[in-house]
Structure formats: structure tokens, C-alpha cells
Amino acid sequence: MAKKEKRSTAFRTIHYYWQVTKVQWPMFLLAVMSTLGFVFFLSYMNPYVLGKVVDIVAEGNVHSGEILKVFGPYIAALIATNVIGQVCSKLQDYSAWKLEIKAAYLLATQAFDTLSNQSMTFHSNRFGGSLVSQTQKFMNAYTILSESLIYAIIPIVSSALFTIGLLLPIVPIYVCILVVLLITYVIIVYWLFKRLLPLNEKAASAQNTLSGELSDSITNILTVKTYGRESYERKIFDDANNNVVRADTKRMRASILRGAVASAIIVVIMIAVVIFIAGGNAWFGISAGSLVMLFTYTYSLTMQFNRLNMTFQQLNRGIGDAHDMTVILDEPTLVDDIEGAKELVVDKGEVEIKHLSFEYTDAGAPSKVFEDFSLSIPAGQRVGIVGRSGSGKTTLTKLLLRLSDIQGGTLEIDGQDISKVQQVSLRSQIAYVPQEPLLFHRTVAENIGYGKPEASFEEIKKAADDANATEFIEKLPNGFDTITGERGVKLSGGQRQRVAIARAILANKPILILDEATSALDSESEKLVQDALKTLMKGRTSIVIAHRLSTVASLDRIVVLSEGKIVEDGTHSELIESNGEYSHLWDRQTGAFLDIE
């Protein structure tokens, strides 16, 4: 079963590569034809013409005054042969290069589209660094395979056909012996090197893991340094690095051993050639020129077949490197649009959740979050969602954004089932500020304007003003043109959140989701941002997730969750009077503040 799976993965890799090659069929055809021309003219026409010259010289009947007359046509033929052969060589290089450039673009686009359209569950279970490494290896593997085809496989096959075709009329017995030896060689080399594919896949996987570990450590470098865990991270990196060394060493030893066997077969072929050439004239009356052709053709062929050893290594390595990304490309999209999905049209912003069921299934055993959960949020209502950690608050927002798909029930916006509309249109109607806002390695202005690409600078600045962000932005080295660093690392947590809030303000969507959006702000900044959010939330359906209950106390309604169920629902004053879960949470938080004072 495992062998069948590996075989099918290799075939799927070739399928993906053929898809990006066939769209360039004129260039691919040029690559094939120029390769055939290069091999034929330089490796076969040259010895053929030279053989004719040797036969004439061997007869010894050409006088000095007849040299140009007798040998002129052969000289011209040799010049033409070499000119055409060199032109074919350059066309071969040009077409191969063009194929690789275009294919790299198409494969990178395909990998990017696949990764960007996968669910958050998919990305949560993988290293970002590994995905980047797998994408790069997938693209590079195309170059390895295409160059192996153009510069090795086609020349090898064509050399065999040209040798057989040109020598068969002259020395049929020799050709029969040669064919048997070559077929034996191909079968043995193929059998030897197909066993290397698992070793190549393991080596590629080890390298991807190394890239992932490196990326994970560098991404969290602040945590590493503040906890003094450099040595620990070094050990993890060393373990991954040693796995790469072990995998590469196994691959190297196996390749060299198999290469030695293949080389031994080439030696046997050359011994047969030498013996045949030595007795060719005496046994079969073969002319000197024909013997020159025979030796040159066979030597050229064996040199080509000697490359078969390296070619199989390259093919194995290319398919091994592409393996992980091929598996990803074959994976179904966990959250996908149905066929014929329509755009979501939001007029009011009413949210209706009916009999919702959802569980996480990626942790081995299923982890149920919601079962028969229902919640109705009228258009324009400001709703706070509170509860202890693990009660399902953030999961609910992810389901509303359709970052994961529910297993039962429906989620509707203005009466439209979100599972039946285009995901992009759904998310384009929702402004979302997560608990940990991550920024792009771009300017502050670009990060704020991300949700509204056509926004003018004045609009971006106004959004920053409303989010209480302008003051700190203008103090940055280049103001709004300051690069924020990877994931916004150059800004503080509170500054990142204000940039993210400014982005949501600028986006101006009918539905607003704030997931702990003010948790990293100091009290003064929070007060100013809360004022801006109150203005933003007017007339919009707003869902506010909060641990800090002061954030939701002034909202129209507060929903209290516990273990995926609604245990309380009402205004702040109503819930305080009911002396239930919310009241206890409120007393605990305000009591804590009083104790501190």
C-alpha cells in the first residue's frame, strides 16, 4: 500500500508539472526538436562525414591537386553540420530556460493559491517555514526534472535510436549485441535507483522540518531570549540538522553504490566494442571509416548512458523534493466554496445561528465545542460575548468568518446561509480585529489601508486619528511610511492593536467583530479607542469578545457562554441583578481592582 501511495505521488507530481508544461507546448516542442538536432548533427553527422573521408583516404587515390575537388563537399558538410548543431544547442538552452521561467511562475502561483485558500486548521498544524521550504523545493524540482529530460533523457534515447538506425545496415550482429547490453543496463539501473526514491523523500522531509524549526525559533526569538532558552533551541535545531545529515548520508551511500554497479556495466559494453572493432575488418570486412563511425557512435552512446546513473539520481531527488507539496496540492480544501456560490449581499447585518454543532477533529480525539447552539443578533445590535477561557467565544467568531466549517446547523447573515456564499464576499462584509493583531512587513499606512486598498492618505490618517494611533505613528522614524517589521515586531502590543483597529475603522463594514481588541491598551488609550469604537459601532451589527468586562458593560446586550452553551443573556444591569455567572465574573474583576487599590 505504501509503495502504491509513493508511486501515485510521483505520478501526481509529474501530472502537475505536465500541466504547466503543456500550456507552453510550442516552447516545449522547440526544446525537444532542438535537442534532437543538437545530438544528431554534433554527435552523429560529424562522425558520419569523417568516416566517409577516412574511407577515401584509406584508398590512397587522391592526389594533392584533387584535394579541394574531392574533399570540398565533405568540408562544407562538416562546416554546415557544426553550424546547425551549435544553433540547435543555443535554441535548446533558450527553450529550456523559457520553460523553467514560465513554469516557476505558474507553480508558485498554484502553491500560493492552494496555501492561501486552505483553512486555518490546515495552517495551525504546520510550520510556516516548512510550507515556504516545500514551495521552493516544488518549484526547484521542476527545473531538475525538465533539465534532466532536455539535457539527459532525450539525448540518451535519441542517441540509442540514431546509433541503431545508422549502424544496423552496416553491422547488424554488433547492433543486436549492443541492444541486449543496453536494455540490460537500463533495467538494472532503473531497478537500482527506484529504490532510492524513499531515501530522497526522507531527505527532503528532513530538510523541510529543519526549515520549519529554524522559522519557528526565529519567529519567536523574543520568547527565546527573554527566557534564556538559546541552548534549548540550539539543541532542537541540532537534532533536526543531524536528521538532515543522516538522511543525506544514507542517500549518498546508496547512490554511490548503485552508481558503481552501473559503471561496471558500461565497462562491459566498452570491452565488447573494442573486441568487435579489433576484429571487425578481418571477420566482417568492415571498412576503416565504418569502424571509426562504429567506435565513435558507441562511445558517444555509452557516455550518454553513463549519464543515466546521474539522471536517475536527479529524477529521484526532484520527485523526492516535490513530494510534500504534491501531497498538499492533492489535499482537499477543508473550507471550500460550493459550486455556483453567490456573493453575500448585506443590507442590514442580521446574524442568525440555528442549532449549531461544531467540534475540532484535528487533535486526534474529537473536541466538541458547540452542540445545538442557537443565537439571534438583530441588525445593528452591539453584543458582547463573555465567558471563561475555553467557553467557545473565539471559536464562534471563526465560524462566523468561516475560517472553519460547522458540522451541523446553519449560520445566516440577512437570511443567507454563509456556507453557500463565496468566502471572499462573506469576509469582505466583516471588519475583524483579532486578539493578537499581526501586521505585514510593510508601512504603517499600508497596514491601515489593507482593508480598503483604494483609500486616500487622508482617509488612512482619519482612521488612525479615530483609533488614537496618530500620535505614536507621527513619532515613528518615517511616520506613516515606517516599516512595521515582520508581524509588526517594531511596534508595541498596544500600538499594533491600534493599527488593527484603525484598519477596521477604515474598512467600514456592516458587521464588526472585535476579539479582545482593546486588551493590550493602557487605560487612557482604551478610553479614547472605546469612544472611537462607539462611533464605529453605531448602526452596525457588532460582536465584541472580551475577558475585561468593562469593555462590554455599555453594549446593548451581553451573552454569557459556558462550555459552548448560553447560560445568560441580557444587559449589563439585568445580568448584575440576576446574580449569576456574569455577576460573579464582574465581582471577581472589580474586586481584584479594589484589592489592588
Image (spheres, helix red, strand yellow):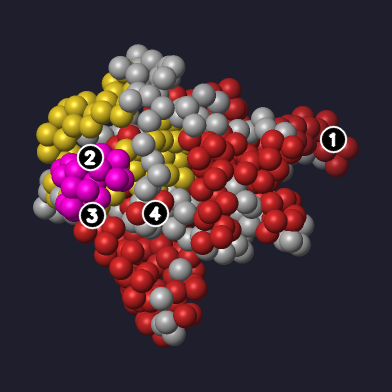
Residue at mark 2? 569
Helix, strand, or loop for circle 1? helix
Residue placed under numbered mark 3 in the picture: 583
Please provide percent x and percent y for residue 455: 67, 33
Amino acid type, mark 3: Ser
What amino acid type is highlighted by mark number 1?
Leu
> Residue 93: percent from the left, percent from the top?
65, 40
Name the residue beneath numbered marker 1.
Answer: 68
Q: Is residue 167 above or below residue 352?
A: below
Q: Answer with mark 4 or mark 1, whichever residue precedes in sequence.
A: 1
Kind of residue at disc 4:
Ser
Which numbered disc, 2 or 3, marks the residue that appears first in the sequence?
Answer: 2
Disc 2 to disc 3, how far (Cα)?
12 Å
**What crowding class fits label 3: few (fewer than 14 Cα within 10 Å), some (14-19), or many (20 or more)?**
some
Is any part of residue 195 visible from this angle? no
Q: Find numbered disc 4 in the image and state the secondary structure of the residue it sits on.
A: helix
SS for dot 2 = strand
